[in-house]
Image (tube, rainbow, N blue to C red):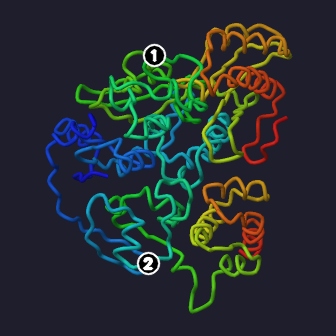
């Protein structure tokens, strides 16, 4: 109660104008106007209609929102879109080329590396980042460096196997 | 999350000026902790000052053989930087023990220092918390306090500092460079974070109008005999129940120099120089290590759910010093503890 009273006396903050942001998403330059508090995740899903990237916890704990920004995997739920003006974004929608699945996507199918599929776009984008980093060689290292991606269905052994297959191909 | 204004700083002076003009603003770099706290309504800045494009992203050797780490160097880049991997592996190991690779890719060096506690009551605006709302009380003392402090706590707050990186920086005797309206200054790492006492709302001795510009490591790097041993409720991507950064310089079996700092046990990275002094000049034996552990924990006190951490910390200190002495640092991917 005390907290609510105190907050109601705070002066309202003027709603700022929307800010123009330019993002190159999956190779296509996109202009959008967003409020300062719009996360990259919400910008992708709600402004650009790219709903492959999932909102799980919205607190950086589950990894479902993982995308690549300038080639590095990050949690898009904890990223403000305005701060990434000019950046190159890769989402799950950008992986397949000319109707052919990316080797990681194919490997996830080959190894049955998902059940419900909700974490899968984040898992695959995270794995793409992991392979680019080149730090994981063993299964232990893959598990450790994929620990930011939670799979509620528990498909972890198959996810590791799928990543190992894709690493062999790349 | 409340509405806020957004502005981008072009250089450090610009950032400092913008903060002086709006004291209710906050700096944002990686945003991994701040955005989360804003979503929970714990942080309510009027304005975010985006410092992520400031030129503070280099890792450079200093004239006296140390290393100067720009405040905006991402945690992952720092952990894998060749100079860190070769000369300060304790720091790299501690960084890789924390968070996830996505978060390490985002989180900055300065932001890691300034992250807030993960005490669940601090995050829950429906409960009293002296750190969030001074004078409202501490819900953790008689609440769920498994993750809470056993050293250095006060009547007002038993929260812990969540960083792994900072435990290594404490052990390595780092310095923090900051800039503010009245110029630049250096803060010894031991003086950077505060104990809660009666002002738990203040985590650090950084002034509200100051900005962290760099962390600096001295030349002594303990590249041979070190370990970062972190014990947690799951094998990865969890905050420490107890973690220990141990670093030794040995002459045969004799300890010439020792560093010992703990994470997960106090409101700040807990370096104990009396335990380090007790190790110096002694043989690297289990008895020596046990004595050091007893010194670190001489004033430790537990609460309903975390008293186990006192004995756990004793064992982790002894094991960490053993790993350091043997030159077999804890792997951060194969979690078997040897």
Residue A63 versus residue B234 in the image, above or below: below
Q: CA distance from mark 2 to mark 1?
A: 50 Å
Q: Secondary structure at mark 1?
A: loop
Subunit that carries the residue with mark 1:
B
Q: Is residue B164 left or right of residue B199?
A: right
Screen quadrant of the N terminus of chain A:
top left
| Left or right of residue B68: residue B327 | right
- Residue where numbered disc 2 is placed: A50
Q: Residue at x 71, y 80 (%)?
A: A109
The structure residue drawn at horizontal position 47% and vertical position 78%, both measured from the top left corner, is A26
| Residues at marks 2 and 1 on the same chain | no
| Residue B197 position (above or below residue B42) | above
**Is residue B183 rendered to the left or right of residue B335?**
left
Residue A118, horizontal then vertical, whole percent? 58, 71
Image position, residue B42 (x, y; %): 36, 41
Depth check: give the residue in front, A11 or A166: A11
Residue identified by numbered label 1: B155
Disc 2 is attached to a residue of which chain?
A: A
Disc 2 on helix, strand or loop?
loop
| Camera-side residue of B3 and B325 | B3
In this picture, is B234 found above or below B145?
A: below
Q: What residue do we see at 38% from left, 26% from top?
A: B130
Mark 1 surroundings: few (<14), some (14-19) or many (≥20) residues within 10 A = few
Q: Quadrant of residue B263?
A: top right
Expressed as whole percent of the image width and height from the top left, the position of residue A114 reads: 68, 73
Q: Nearer the viewer, mark 2 or mark 1?
A: 1
Q: Is residue B227 left or right of residue A55?
A: right
Q: Residues within 10 Å of mark 2 (few under 14, many from 20)?
A: some
Q: Residue at x 48, y 25 (%)?
A: B175
Q: Quarter of the image for the C terminus of chain A: give it.
A: bottom right
Specify the quadrant of the image occupied by residue B84. Answer: top right
């Amino acid at each position: 109660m005390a907290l609510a009273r105190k907050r109601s006396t705070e002066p309202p903050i003027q709603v700022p104008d929307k800010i123009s942001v330019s993002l190159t998403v999956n190779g296509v330059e996109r202009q959008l106007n967003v409020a300062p508090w719009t996360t990259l995740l919400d910008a992708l899903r709600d402004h650009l209609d790219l709903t492959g990237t999932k909102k799980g916890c919205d607190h950086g704990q589950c990894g479902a929102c993982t995308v690549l920004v300038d080639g590095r995997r990050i949690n898009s739920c904890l990223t403000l879109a305005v701060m990434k003006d000019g950046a190159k974004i890769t989402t799950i929608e950008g992986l397949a080329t000319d109707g052919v699945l990316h080797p990681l996507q194919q490997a996830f199918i080959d190894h049955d590396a998902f059940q419900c599929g909700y974490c899968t776009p984040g898992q695959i984008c995270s794995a793409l980042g992991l392979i680019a980093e080149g730090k994981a060689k063993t299964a232990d290292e893959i598990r450790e460096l994929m620990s930011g991606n939670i799979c509620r269905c528990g498909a972890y052994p198959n996810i590791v196997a799928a990543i190992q297959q894709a690493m062999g191909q790349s | 999350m409340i509405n806020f204004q957004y502005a981008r700083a072009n250089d450090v002076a610009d950032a400092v000026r913008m903060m002086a003009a709006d004291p209710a603003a906050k700096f944002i770099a990686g945003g991994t902790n701040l955005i989360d706290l804003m979503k929970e309504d714990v942080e309510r800045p009027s304005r975010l000052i985006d410092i992520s494009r400031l030129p503070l992203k280099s890792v450079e050797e200093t004239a006296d053989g140390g290393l100067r780490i720009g405040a905006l160097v991402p945690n992952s880049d720092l952990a894998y930087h060749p100079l860190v991997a070769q000369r300060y592996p304790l720091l790299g190991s501690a960084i890789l023990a924390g968070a996830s690779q996505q978060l390490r890719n985002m989180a900055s060096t300065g932001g890691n220092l300034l992250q807030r506690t993960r005490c669940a009551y601090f995050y829950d605006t429906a409960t009293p918390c002296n750190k969030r709302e001074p004078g409202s009380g501490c819900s953790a003392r008689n609440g769920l306090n498994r993750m809470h402090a056993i050293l250095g706590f006060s009547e007002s707050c038993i929260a812990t500092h969540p960083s792994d990186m900072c435990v290594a920086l404490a052990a390595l005797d780092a310095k923090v460079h900051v800039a503010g309206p009245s110029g630049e200054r250096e803060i010894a790492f031991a003086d950077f974070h505060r104990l809660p006492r009666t002002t738990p709302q203040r985590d650090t001795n950084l002034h509200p109008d100051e900005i962290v510009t760099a962390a600096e490591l001295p030349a002594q790097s303990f590249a041979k005999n070190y370990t970062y041993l972190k014990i947690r409720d799951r094998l990865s991507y969890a905050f420490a129940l107890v973690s220990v950064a141990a670093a030794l310089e040995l002459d045969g079996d004799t300890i010439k120099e020792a560093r010992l700092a703990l994470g997960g046990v106090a409101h700040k990275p807990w370096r104990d120089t009396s335990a380090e002094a007790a190790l110096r000049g002694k043989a690297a034996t289990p008895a020596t290590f046990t004595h050091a552990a007893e010194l670190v924990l001489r004033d430790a006190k537990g609460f309903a759910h975390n008293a186990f951490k006192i004995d756990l910390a004793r064992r982790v200190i002894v094991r960490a010093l053993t790993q350091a002495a043997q030159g077999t640092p804890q792997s951060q991917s194969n979690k078997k503890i040897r």
